[in-house]
Image (cartoon, helix red, strand yellow):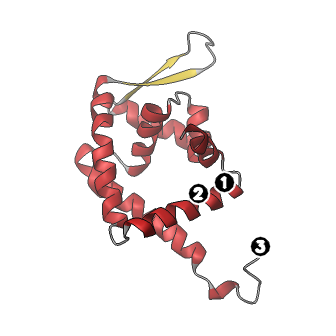
Amino acid sequence: MSHFTPENFFDSQLGMLLGRTASLKDRILDQYLEVHSVTAAQFKVLIIVAEWGLDSPGDLCRHLSLDSGSMTRMLDRLEQKGLIRRARSEADRRQICITLTPDGQQLVARLPHIGADAMNRLVGVLDTAELAELERLLKKILLNAGDPVACWRMGKK
């Protein structure tokens, strides 16, 4: 269904609102994570490694829509903080496997609490039905677009 034309394009603020909401989410997460010296972007990597079982830089790049250079720098910072370890795969020496260190595992255990607090601050203005509808609509958009992460996660639930 087409909702936009060149004539009415500037009447909608949808793109701007989606982008600003995503930025606000990351700023709020950054505030909650500052005490742990971790950024929202690093939070996402740690969550994916811990909860989704992804352990290769390539898989992380695909799921976070980052280029390999950005991912390498991100993994360098997490390794310097002592939260992850990178090692060659035993099965295929060309591959790098990422694992959480004991410090990384301790932090990951706290991330659901931090994430819940941050998300409550972000969407606390919505009632339960509004929140469920927002999530449903965003999933519908992403699934229709064939978003690999949304499709993958929907298959896991």
Q: Is residue 140 above or below residue 41?
A: below
Seen at 32% across and 67% down, the residue is 124
Callout 3: 10 Å neighbours few (<14), some, many (20+)? few
Q: Amino acid at mark 3?
A: Met
Q: x and y percent of residue 95 in the render?
A: 61, 20
Q: x and y percent of residue 60 in the render?
A: 55, 37
Mark sitting earlier along the chain (3/2) = 3
State the separation of the CA atoms marked 3 and 2: 17 Å
Callout 2: 10 Å neighbours few (<14), some, many (20+)? some
Mark 1 highlights which residue?
Answer: 143
Mark sitting earlier along the chain (1/3) = 3
Callout 1: 10 Å neighbours few (<14), some, many (20+)? some
Q: Secondary structure at mark 2?
A: helix
Is residue 22 or residue 41 the one in the foreground?
22
Seen at 46% across and 32% down, the residue is 49
Which residue reaches farthest front?
129
Is residue 72 or residue 39 the one in the foreground?
39
Q: Amino acid at mark 2?
A: Lys
Mark 2 highlights which residue?
Answer: 139
State the separation of the CA atoms marked 1 and 3: 15 Å
Q: Secondary structure at mark 3?
A: loop
Seen at 75% across and 90% down, the residue is 7
Report if the CB atoms under discs 2 and 1 are less than 8 Å apart: yes
State the separation of the CA atoms marked 2 and 1: 6 Å
Seen at 51% across and 60% down, the residue is 135
Residue 1 is marked as: 3
Q: Amino acid at mark 1?
A: Leu
Location of the N terminus by quadrant is: bottom right
Q: x and y percent of residue 5 in the render?
A: 77, 83
